[in-house]
Amino acid sequence: MDVQNIYYTTREAFGRSFDYRKFWQHISKQGDIKVANAYAIKRNVDDQIKFQSALRHIGFNVILKPLFRRADGTAKGDWDVGITIDMLEAASELDQVVLLSGDGDFSILVQHIMKKHKIKTQVFGVPKLSSDSLINACTDFIPIDGIWLQNP
């Protein structure tokens, strides 16, 4: 799960947060969960620490990295390479990969995993904020809409 992508796209599109517990219950019914990584940016802020603890409690392995600050003052927090490496490493042991992100950079990864490992790929993303290339690359695209959101 690309935590930043899901957080910001559900906030932008719906003004609400994604319901990670409901998602976990849904994918648990599909079969055994072998790997469940949530990739996030490390900020020593109470809300973030509580959120990450909640994700761990649900069952996610929370993987953190610091926010990178550039010399010009801008910041970057991107897990694309880390997510890609971990998915490539795990794919040979799986019959399906589930990705939570709308980032089009993952379309090549999804196509590669499907071709090389002959497995299904399921992507959850906010439709109007998800890349068409990712939507078209995966086996199944599950639109994040009201049923996947926390109550206001």
Image: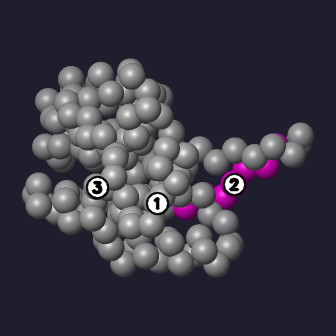
Of callouts 1 and 3, the N-terminal one: 1
Where is the C terminus found, in terms of image quarters? Answer: bottom left
| Amino acid type, mark 3 | Ile
**Residue placed under numbered mark 1 in the picture:** 17
Q: CA distance from mark 2 to mark 3?
A: 31 Å
| Residue 67, numbered circle | 2
Most extreme residue toward the front is: 152
Residue drawn 19% across and 59% down? 26
The part of the chain drawn in magenta is: 64-70
Q: Disc 2 residue type?
A: Leu
Question: Is 35 left or right of 69, judged from the image as shown?
Answer: left
Q: Secondary structure at mark 3?
A: helix
x then y, percent, for residue 44: 68, 72
Q: Earlier in the sequence, mark 2 or mark 1?
A: 1
Q: Which mark is residue 65?
A: none
Q: Amino acid at mark 1?
A: Ser
Residue with the mark numbered 3: 147
